[in-house]
Image (tube, grey):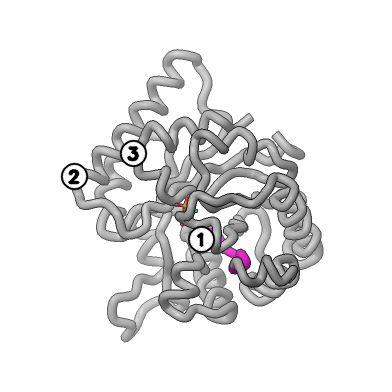
Amino acid sequence: MAQGRRKLIAGNWKMNGLHQDGLDLARELSHRSVAAHRASGQHLPCDLLICPPATLLITLAEALTGAAILLGGQDCHAEVKGAHTGDLSAEMLRDAGCSHVIVGHSERRIDHGENDAIVHGKAAAAMRAGLVAVVCVGESEAERNAGRALDVVAGQLAGSIPDGMGAGTLVVAYEPVWAIGTGKTPTVADVAEMHAHIRNRLDGQVAAAEQLRILYGGSVKPSNAVELLAVDNVDGALVGGASLAASDFWDIARACR
Ligand code: PEP
């Protein structure tokens, strides 16, 4: 475990999961967690977080009572309440049983035109509500090919993260847009370079940056998890597709050292 940072494996279910499927998946993870503890007397060497669709949050919060699995939302509005049809506030997510919320995922940045200022407002809302904000950053393929990846991510960090955040309120997820859902991943050297860059950039911007968890996301699966999770400054993973199968998500969690 790097510098005492416990790894975090987070599952982003995106827009997947009707009631029974979601319940079955959460229960399977919960059973595995309890069984592993009984068998070895030890918990996983990482924290587990699942971020299901909002329709499942209250059901899963009840189903996971007593299980060592955290619950998160996939997005929130910056305001506490008001005339924002279709949106959820960070306070509502907290009320539904969440401890975390993803903000600034590239699918929100692209599909909903969310820029850094909007993500900044959502991260501030998470902090206000007592949630940990999982702030996503990452370059497009064109930006990487143009040699701009480090600068793009530095700009996103500066623009998306409010003052006053620290390891207790913030997790950063580096997700190269071109690696999400494509089966492509950056080289280990590129991941190491970017994660060191993120920690350096955040030193001074957030409190105790050395304690901050920086996740890698983009086509993480059981077959590449050991290699990716062993990279310096990779403190866990944000997992999309592979989080929808309990066995794959579990195997990724077991790849933590
Ligand atoms: C994601 O959407 O955050 C993600 C990392 O997706 P996938 O693992 O499917 O690439």
Mark sitting on residue 72 = none
Q: Nearer the viewer, mark 2 or mark 1?
A: 2
Quadrant of image for the C terminus: top right
Residue at image coords 26%, 46%? 22
Number of residues whose C-alpha sits closer than 10 Å to that of mark 1, classed few (under 14), some (14–19) or many (20 or more): some
Q: In this view of the protein, can residue 164 be seen by the observer?
A: no
The residues colored magenta run: 131-140
Q: Nearer the viewer, residue 195 or 86?
A: 195
Task: Report helix, strand or loop for mark 3.
Answer: loop
Marks 1 and 3, how far apart in space? Answer: 19 Å
Identify the mark nearer the N-term, 2 or 1: 2
Q: Is residue 84 left or right of residue 50?
A: left
Residue occupied by mark 2: 20
Q: Nearer the viewer, residue 88 or 75?
A: 75
Residue occupied by mark 3: 65
Q: Is residue 235 left or right of residue 248?
A: right
Report if the CB atoms under discs 2 and 1 are less than 8 Å apart. no
Number of residues whose C-alpha sits closer than 10 Å to that of mark 3, classed few (under 14), some (14–19) or many (20 or more): few
Is the residue at mark 1 in contact range of ligand 1, meaning its CB lies under 8 Å from it? no
Q: Mark 3 is on which residue type?
A: Thr
Q: Mark 2 is on which residue type?
A: Gln
Q: Mark 1 is on which residue type?
A: Gly
Mark sitting on residue 130 = 1
142 up-or-down from 212: above or below: below
Q: Position of residue 47 (x, y in %)?
A: 53, 39
Q: Position of residue 211 (x, y in %)?
A: 72, 48
Q: In this view of the protein, can residue 245 be seen by the observer?
A: yes
Q: Position of residue 1 (x, y in %)?
A: 70, 34
